[in-house]
Amino acid sequence: MLVQRLGAPSDFDPLLERIRDARIVMIGEATHGTHDYYRLREQLTRRLIAERGFSFVAVEGDWPDCERVHRSVTAAPNGLADPQAALERFERWPTWMWANAEVARFCRWLRAWNLEQPVQRRAGFHGLDVYSLWESMQAIFDYLGEEDPTSLEAAQEAYRCFEPYGRRVEEYGAASRFVSARCEEEVIKLLARTRERAALDGPDRFSAWQNAEVVAGAERYYRAMVAGGPESWNVRDIHMADTLDRLLDFHGPDARGVVWAHNTHVGDARATDMTAGGLVNIGQLARERHGADDVVLVGFGSYRGTVVAAPRWGSPAEAMVVPPARPGSVERRLHELMPERAVLVFGGPDQPGWVTDEHDHRAIGVVYDPTFESWGNYVPTRLGERYDAFVWCDDTTALHPLPALTTFGEMETYPAGV
């Protein structure tokens, strides 16, 4: 194991050496609301794009919202001139995950960097998630209305199937146990038709295809969510892994991708108690599909600080105090052993027991109650198996949300809101 104190972007050199020619780098976070995680992740990602030729960033966000950001950062036709304006249009709660000053700073840098590159080398910004059923459906209507009016009827049939539930997708999930499989059938028809049309090259066709995949994934997700158990989590993470693979194919045989998501998605589930609960995640799936040499998983963690989160689902975000990590946890051990900021690169024969043995590892979602620290908010973890590297920040501060419209978000599964 190698430990490098972090002070400047150049201090990530040992991690870049570990990454070498890997095609996928997943960079996690222990919360969705910590300035330090976003800032350090930005520094590493800038280097991956500018020095190692990575082709895109794919985030734990909705495809239609991120498509607006992508068009802005790549200076695509009809793209907004300022990426922050695109981020401020994120509406689904929790908006602060991506509509924040830290992401805006990165996206403005990305646009400036892209403007100096030929169009075919510009790095993209994409969403991996599955929630945007209605927004993706509308995007399909918009595309087909302009490019393929003959296929519009198939999309309208799928829409009419969901229409009785308005935008209350949780009601569709509940009703799906008692009604026919018509919605599922219509979505499959829509997906097949859109995939056929998207076989031709072009970013607009690819985006339409991905929106159809989101509609299909969302239909499966909301049905599974009502049934309970691990299935809805797995539908979501498999969808994100499939989307990542489509992006790699779309960007070409030499494409390399950076993923930004919560540790609980990025860190290999097989090194936690998630496997015992029947759960998989994108870190595990990427290693299984692409091989360990082509995938580098990077986790984040901290001992104490402040974070932006919400006390209840759908409620306004607020800055909360994160108490010191509990005894016996990974974070408590790192607090005792590490500099204030450091990057740990795992590997080699002489890794200490706290890297190879199982210890609690803190995971804070968009819903957070600091009083639960004594019994919740931790995932049993073998750190050196879950990640290839780990970024440590002893004391952290809350990120800075942008003003944004907010709509009530759908329920997630495990842990609270990741």
Image: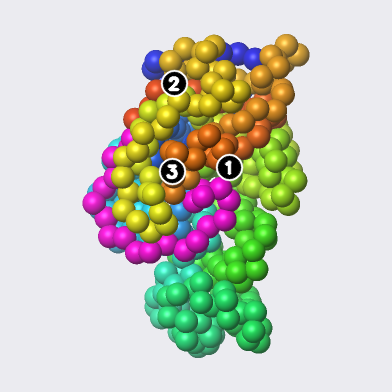
**Vertical side of 175 occupied by 200: above or below:** above
Which circle marks residue 369 in the picture? 3
Q: Of the two numbered discs 1 and 2 on the same chain, state the one appearing first in sequence.
A: 1
Q: Amino acid at mark 3?
A: Asp
Query: Which residue is disc 1 drawn over?
Result: 264
Q: Of the two numbered discs 2 and 3 on the same chain, state the one appearing first in sequence.
A: 3
Q: Of the two numbered discs 1 and 3 on the same chain, state the one appearing first in sequence.
A: 1
* Quadrant of residue 18 within the rendered picture: top right
Q: Secondary structure at mark 3?
A: loop
* Quadrant of residue 386 within the rendered picture: top right
Q: Position of residue 46 (x, y in %)?
A: 42, 32
What residue is shown at x 62% (from left), y 31% (from top)? Answer: 360
Q: Is residue 23 visible?
A: no
Q: Which residues are magenta?
A: 398-418
Q: Position of residue 129 (x, y in %)?
A: 52, 56
What residue is shown at x 50% (from left), y 26% (from top)? Answer: 325
Colour theme: rainbow
| Main secondary structure found in the magenta portion | loop
Q: Amino acid at mark 1?
A: Thr
Which circle marks residue 34 in the picture? none
Query: Which residue is disc 2 drawn over?
Result: 394
159 and 122: which is toward the camera: 159
Q: Is residue 416 in the magenta section?
A: yes
What residue is shown at x 65% (from left), y 27% (from top)? Answer: 359
C-beta proximity under 8 Å, tags 2 and 3: no
How far apart are the two marked residues, 2 and 3, measured between alpha carbons?
20 Å
- At label 3, counting other C-alpha atoms closer than 10 Å, the crowd grade (few under 14, some 14-19, many 20 or more) is some
Q: Quadrant of the N terminus?
A: top right
